[in-house]
């Protein structure tokens, strides 16, 4: 079987080579003898053989034509000859326009039913093409490539910077701010602050503890934590943009970023990234503890040195990015553990405590790790063709079926993770109940996304469910911190803590014992 020629007219891609040559010669002969300088009778003496449209649908020898232009010229000539041979009154006239021939041949080909004229294997090929047509051209507007994507914050800031004069300070500040990916940076900072606030410290609102010892939640430590985490995230994002401006230019969502639009020089972006990285790591080291500073530097190294280059090589880059997303909760937990450390305060005590008090930090890291998949998988599915064109190996186009399975798999782990936070003593047991509806909602959307493979608005539904899921879970955890409301009630009513009562009785006994001993002496 010879391959068909795509450059021919509809209905003429299967024509006999010898018949085509004869038609061409007869057409040229008729054109030569039908000129005005010759009598019309001489042209009428030329015998004309009539061809039916079905005759040119029998085989594929016309694929031997050299080049699409020659094939198109021969197809037009044969179509004109066929049209003229079917009408004896016009067989001796000049050729009609190509558009008329096109409509005639197309009408003749369309009038033939495929079941009666096409060979069995061609009918099967047509059936497969028709079956695949709804997937390649969906009619649902929710399946459009950018139907489920929010506007990119960096691109919006870059567009705002471009409206200012080239030498203005606002233009430079907006361009530098867009390098930090402000929306992603805010999420990173919040994911570090929540575990710090939820670290279990006894006597949360006890006035005696606040007077006699350092506060459990130090405002100064919190300030250094948020500032250092913000600068580390900005440095990692700036290095990411420095590495891939060519791929950003190929995608509609990122083509307006500052380095693509040349709002900043490469030197300025490098200085910004290095300055933010050094300042942020130094702030974490001096204001929090060395363990948190190491985690911040590790986050920069993994994001810029592993995740970004791996996007061109393997779809496993998504798992590396999820590990990066789980580091900020560990930073917040280690910052809270450093406030009440009783030993040397090294990374072993802060992250791998022997009494099991560090389990809560790893559970929060698991929440952020698992959340990356039901959030990113539908987000990437909407622009899967752009990822493919840019050469970035994402699971949404490398293996679409696995893309849905991964999103579903990790959306189911939030229920046991929330129960684990209750069992570890980080939150009250009511948190497992109040967080169940939002966890079930995310799992339901993930099941729909997996079954429909992103079509019929399932990608959009899962994406927005993930957007609401994380802040709701974190707020519920904050509102149901272990023992918080009991201590608030006792501080408002004036009831003393149980530990304080025991301590007072011990002090009274010691005082009485000292008085008795003095009297005996």
Image (cartoon, grey):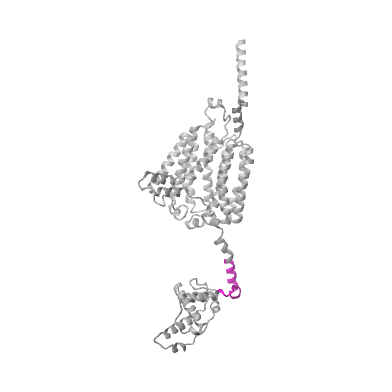
Could you tell me which residue is drawn at 60 percent across and 51 percent down? 446
24 in relation to 503, above or below? below
Which region is colored magenta?
110-129
Say whether residue 419 is visible: no
Judge by depth and name the residue closer to the eye, 456 or 497. Answer: 456
- Classify the position of the C terminus by image quarter: top right
Residue 399: % across, % down: 56, 56
Residue 75: % across, % down: 48, 76
Q: Is residue 248 magenta?
A: no
- Classify the position of the N terminus by image quarter: bottom right
Residue 48: % across, % down: 49, 85
Main SS, magenta residues: helix
397 in relation to 98, above or below? above
Q: In the image as oriented, which residue stretches furthest toward the front?
A: 89
Residue 122: % across, % down: 58, 71
Q: In the image as oriented, which residue stretches furthest toward the left?
A: 167
Could you tell me which residue is drawn at 55 percent across and 75 percent down? 109
Judge by depth and name the residue closer to the eye, 186 or 276. Answer: 186
């Amino acid at each position: 079987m010879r391959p068909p020629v795509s450059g021919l007219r509809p209905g003429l891609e299967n024509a006999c080579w010898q018949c085509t040559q004869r038609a061409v010669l007869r057409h040229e002969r008729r054109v030569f003898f039908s000129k005005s300088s010759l009598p019309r009778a001489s042209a009428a003496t030329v015998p004309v053989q009539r061809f039916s449209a079905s005759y040119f649908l029998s085989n594929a020898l016309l694929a031997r034509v050299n080049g699409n232009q020659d094939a198109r010229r021969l197809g037009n000539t044969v179509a004109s000859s066929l049209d003229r041979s079917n009408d004896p009154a016009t067989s001796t006239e000049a050729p009609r326009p190509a558009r008329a021939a096109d409509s005639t041949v197309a009408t003749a080909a369309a009038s033939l039913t495929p079941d009666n004229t096409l060979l069995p294997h061609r009918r099967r090929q047509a059936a497969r093409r028709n079956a695949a047509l709804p997937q390649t051209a969906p009619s649902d507007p929710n399946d459009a490539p950018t139907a489920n994507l929010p506007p990119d914050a960096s691109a919006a800031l870059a567009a705002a910077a471009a409206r200012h004069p080239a030498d203005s300070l606002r233009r430079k500040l907006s361009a530098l701010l867009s390098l930090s990916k402000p929306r992603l940076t805010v999420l990173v900072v919040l994911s570090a602050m929540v575990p710090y606030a939820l670290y279990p410290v006894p006597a949360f609102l006890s006035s005696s503890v606040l007077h006699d010892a350092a506060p459990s939640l130090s405002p100064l430590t919190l300030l250094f934590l948020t500032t250092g985490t913000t600068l580390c995230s900005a440095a990692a994002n700036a290095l990411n943009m420095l590495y891939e401006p060519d791929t950003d230019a190929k995608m509609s969502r990122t083509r307006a970023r500052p380095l693509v639009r040349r709002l900043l020089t490469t030197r300025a972006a490098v200085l910004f990234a290095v300055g933010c990285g050094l300042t942020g790591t130094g702030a974490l080291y001096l204001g929090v503890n060395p363990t948190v500073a190491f985690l911040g530097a590790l986050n920069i190294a993994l994001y810029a040195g592993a995740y970004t280059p791996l996007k061109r090589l393997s779809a496993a880059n998504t798992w590396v990015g999820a590990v990066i997303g789980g580091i900020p909760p560990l930073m917040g937990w280690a910052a809270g553990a450093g406030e009440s450390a009783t030993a040397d305060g090294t990374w072993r005590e802060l992250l791998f405590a022997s009494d099991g008090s560090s389990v809560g930090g790893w559970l929060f890291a698991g929440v952020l790790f698992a959340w990356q998949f039901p959030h990113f998988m539908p987000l990437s599915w909407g622009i899967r063709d752009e990822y493919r064109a840019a050469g970035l190996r994402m699971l949404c186009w490398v293996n679409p079926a696995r893309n849905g399975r991964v999103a579903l798999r990790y959306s189911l782990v939030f229920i046991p993770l929330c129960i684990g936070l209750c069992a570890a003593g980080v939150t009250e047991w009511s948190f497992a109940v109040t967080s169940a509806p939002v966890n079930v909602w995310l799992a339901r959307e993930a099941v729909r996304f997996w079954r429909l493979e992103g079509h019929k608005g399932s990608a959009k539904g899962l994406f927005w469910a993930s957007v609401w899921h994380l802040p709701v879970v974190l707020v519920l955890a904050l509102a149901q911190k272990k023992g918080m409301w009991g201590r608030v009630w006792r501080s408002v009513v004036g009831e003393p803590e149980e530990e304080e009562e025991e301590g007072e009785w011990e002090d009274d006994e010691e005082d009485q014992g000292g008085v008795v001993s003095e009297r005996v002496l």
